[in-house]
Image: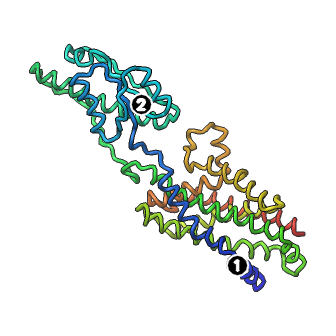
Amino acid sequence: MNIILNIIKKEFSQFKRDPKMFGIVLVAPIIQLIFLGYAATMDVNNVHILFLDKDKTEESRNFIERFESSGFFSIDYYAENYEELTEQVNKAKVLVGFVIPNNFSKNINRNETVKLQAIFDGSDGNTASIAAGYITKIISEYSQNIIMDYREKKGMKVLPVGQISAEVRTWYNPYLKTRYFMVPAIVGLLLSIITLILTSLAVVKEKEIGTLEQIIVTPIKPYQLIIGKLVPFTIMGFISVILVITMMNILFGIPVRGSVTFLLVASFFYILSTLGLGLFVSTISKTQQQAMMIAIFGIMMPMVYLSGFAFPIENMPKILQYISYLIPLRYFITILRGVVLKGIGIADLWQETAILFLMGILILLLSSLRFRKRLD
């Protein structure tokens, strides 16, 4: 036990001599949280739109006013012809080019159907789809007002008929903000970076400077070296989790609604996986550059893409959905969002927790055996 404690003290002494390491553990998570929390959003609050108004009547101006007053659109241009509209869309100056045809007002007054044209820049399909929803709603409300005015002018009574009315309530994220979805998952991302990458770099650094060979020839047993190496990174991982959870509440007003204790236990199970993966990377890397490249491009990027961090797993091809079951971050992000946003606990998340624990033990055990074999 004393040997393990001495190795842990040695690791912390190395951290103390390297102020950059403390910066990575204490400052980098907050900076990453701020950047990702504010930048990683898919909300569409301002749609740049252009109008080609061929009618130029009071009726068409009132119609355009509906877009301006909705709060979602910014009218940047009024084109004079199709060429100008096409040029602005091609240059990505506007997302939507909207064409109001001739006789817009005249056809409405004749009670005839008016065909409008909306041309979208579909290079960003998600944003275009959301903007199309805004436009559809505005046109629907405008058409409804025309019908009501017509009935009033004609003195037509509205016949009472049965209707279907749905009262929509959104739980956990009432304003449907992307930030609420992304920020809790950032905890998992930062924990992966700190425990996986730093572990692999620290061990490979010992190889490069030759101190690992000096340790091997001492009476220290392999399991003592492994535990002594991994414990400091586990502690730093917990410090980062607590730091990020606290700042998440202060900066973005997203508190942990569920049990913090359960969240920390789940974090420990996840750390087992990332420490194991970091140890594995250290066994197949000869230099810190190799370790960094393998950790980021070989492990981190696939984990981020396939874990549901940003992209819904349900929308992926079946083969990728099956592969995602092998990603520990998938289960940890489910736990994070469940505990932070929904306030649920072990009763609802026991399956994810059990899988995360078993995967953590298995990965860490296999990586430790490989690391021990290399030492022998």
- Residue 300 lies, in percent from the top left, at 67, 54
- Residue 154 lies, in percent from the top left, at 11, 19
- The residue sitting at 20% across, 23% down in the picture is 147
Q: What label sits on residue 189 in the rendered view?
A: none
Locate the C terminus and report the quarter of the image it occupies. Answer: bottom right
Which quadrant would residue 20 be assigned to in this image?
Answer: bottom right
Amino acid type, residue under disc 1 in the picture? Arg
For the residues labelled 2 and 1, the Cα–Cα distance comes to: 56 Å
- The residue sitting at 40% across, 62% down in the picture is 253
Specify whether residue 348 is in view.
no
- The residue sitting at 34% across, 47% down in the picture is 169
Amino acid type, residue under disc 2 in the picture? Val
Mark 2, residue position: 96
Which quadrant would residue 113 be assigned to in this image?
Answer: top left
Q: What label sits on residue 17 in the rendered view?
A: 1
Specify whether residue 18 is in view.
yes
